[in-house]
Image: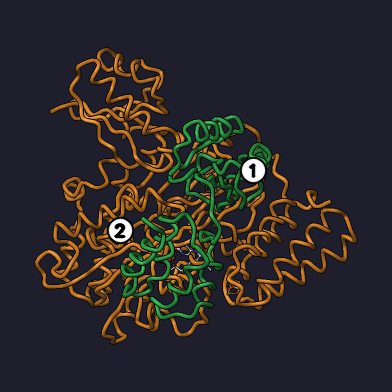
Amino acid sequence: MQSDQVLAELLDRYRDTPGGLLPLLHAIQDRLGHIPPDSVPAIATALNLSRAEVHGVISFYHDFHSDPRGRHRIQICRAEACQAMGSRLLEAHAKAALGIDFGETTVDGAVTLEPVYCLGNCACSPSVRIDERVHARVSTDRFDALVAGLRGGGAGK
Amino acid sequence: MNTRFFVPRDTTALALGSDEVAVALGAELASRSLAGDVVRNGSRGAFWLEPLLEVEQAGQRLAFGPVAAADLPGVLDALQGVPGEHPLCLGPVDEIPWLASQQRLTFARAGQDDPLSLDAYRRQEGFRGLERALELGPQGIVDEVTASGLRGRGGAAFPAGIKWQTVLDTPAEQKYIVCNADEGDSGTFADRLLMEADPYQLIEGMIIAGLAVEATQGFIYLRSEYPAALGVLNAAIAGAEAAGYLGDDIGGSGRAFHLEVRVGAGAYICGEETSLLDSLEGKRGMVRTKPPLPAIRGLFGQPTVVNNVLTLAAVSTVLARGSQYYHDFGSGRSRGTLTVQLAGNIRRGGLVEIPFGATLRELLEDFGGGTFSGRPMRAIQVGGPLGAYLPEPQWDTPVDYEAFAAIGAMLGHGGVVVFDDTVDMGAQARFAMEFCAAESCGKCTPCRIGSTRGLEVIDRIIAREAPAQNRALLNDLCDTMESASLCAMGGLTPNPVRSALAHFAEDFG
Ligand SMILES: Cc1cc2nc3c(=O)[nH]c(=O)nc-3n(C[C@H](O)[C@H](O)[C@H](O)COP(=O)(O)O)c2cc1C
Ligand code: SF4
Ligand code: FES
């Protein structure tokens, strides 16, 4: 389906939902991978908001982004329980191994790296989330194996 | 009856490979032509034993853990012979000391069965609280909750009954029940565990809340970091609707209650209740000035109960067993049970529910068993990222709201994060400011600008640039954040910073 059609369908679905902007933005991002900047005027019209309001919401929340991302999202937990189990080291290793900083995507388009503050897996830290799955006690070796698995499989979302 | 095998589907169990165990178990049973049902239960919260495999034979449940797929042939062999001789056998699950020495009320059902089985829920007292609530009527329910002494479990420990009374007494066409499932504090996972292991208890608590204050619509505001909980909750809501517990006619009573999950978008501040309400309304999660209280003007301007997951879940027990039963647990003004989560560098991490009264040291030693690394413990952060770092002499403090307040600490949502002696407390103080700068809603200057300044000043202290002056500056900055911030994000960030400086001064240059 064209992204215009997807957008039209989703706008229809959430137009009359009270407080529907967040569910709508999540749905757009799930389907299109990001929230295209040129979709903002249509979102604003459908939900009877100003463009500035829509833009303000997109920029307020860490989850939403306007630029295209990699096929997989890797989130590294930066919060305290994971720090106590070596997440600072893991974070540095991940950035070096992938050759990117937080918020960036590898040149092959496979992976976008993001920080996250707690995944609720704090009894078995350090924690990493890859797409919809959380991984526990992630050593640097385990991290490398997980990334190799993503690239080998390559199927993406 | 077939032998039943239980393999948890909880986030942490999955993160440790429980899906792989379940798949391998199915294959191994098939290859041996053995009959057996594989049940995907929730977790009991003994995360240090996950993946925890339980085998139910002849009325007894034997536990093995932590189990990997490769261990299964050996475990199945042992089951034909003397199971207790297998090195991973932990004996009957109810007799594992770590679990047996707990006092579980809210988490009594967690891990016992398929979280989505309504039959299993009903077999274990499920919906009994709702039945009683339908008999009692609104004021009767509120009186029960007030009499139980139940206090909010999200952090502020405000009496639940008083909040509900306000909403009941405020007339409106539409009222709302909002469950705060944002659980943003590092070191906490009790809400997640409950939602994944026993979702009907939360749903039942929310229906009871709706009946109590005459609200017909509920929302669960769930953080986006919890995808597994989202799946379980949505399935449980669908199940409860199909069985007539949710909808226009709850259990044939003529009363209506509808429930929907809304997913957050990665903002810590949206755990603060007024910011959460703005977010639910589809806006930026900005903190609102109080008054008006959400109980009077909350979601979409209507009277709204906002409670934490554990608070709402506990209501099911209060109603099922009666307020006196709940009140009989605990001490002083801390009634019921205490839920703590042992996290970070800990050997036996997981969820502990016990009566109030134990000291922090007892929790760390008796349940926690020391650090995961085997090195000495050095600092404990209790109550999330806004909680103080406690040095060894403070570990004899009883874990309850008042005793913690007395030493300038807070229990919050019960997260206990352990650090060993390799921790750099300068880096921890720095992170507290960094986190505040990243997660501030931006409404007030002391929090938004103060945290960024604080970060710079701590960097200078660590680099030994004019340390005395910079310490004085940091102190002033903390004073301003404490006295002039609109909410606890800016107001409490000085807690971890000041406690690190006071008790671990040697780490600051
Ligand atoms: C910065 C900040 C973050 C908070 N995060 C949460 C949270 O994640 N979950 C929660 O239940 N309460 C959180 N609270 C407390 C809520 O504002 C509110 O007190 C609570 O939801 C009320 O429910 P309770 O009375 O059942 O605890 C937070 C408060 C602040 C100031
Ligand atoms: S203290 Fe911080 S988070 Fe709280 S209202 Fe002010 S700016 Fe927002
Ligand atoms: S702090 Fe990393 S999972 Fe909770």
Q: Position of residue B358 (x, y in %)?
A: 48, 49
Horizontally, residue B238 falls left or right of residue B405, namely left
Residue drawn at (37%, 42%) of the image: B10
Q: Quadrant of the N terminus of chain B?
A: top left
Q: Position of residue B195 (x, y in %)?
A: 34, 52
Q: Residues within 10 Å of mark 2 (few under 14, many from 20)?
A: many
Q: Give the chain coloured orange.
A: B
Disc 2 beta carbon < 8 A from ligand 1?
no
Residue B105 shows in this picture: yes
Residue drawn at (35%, 77%) of the image: B304
Helix, strand or loop under label 1 = helix
Residue nearest the viewer, comparing B228 with B253: B228
The residue pinned by badge 2 equals B202
Residue B308 shows in this picture: no
Q: How is the image coloured?
A: by chain
The chain that hosts pointer 2 is B
Residue B180 higher or lower than B430, as above or below: below
Furthest-front residue in this view: A2
The chain that hosts pointer 1 is A
Which amino acid type is marked by label 2? Answer: Leu
Residue drawn at (40%, 20%) of the image: B70
Which amino acid type is marked by label 1? Answer: Glu
Q: Give the chain coloured green.
A: A
Horizontally, residue B102 falls left or right of residue A61, namely left
Residue nearest the viewer, comparing B47 with A3: A3
Residue nearest the viewer, comparing B279 with B271: B279
The residue pinned by badge 1 equals A91
Quadrant of residue B166 within the rendered picture: bottom left
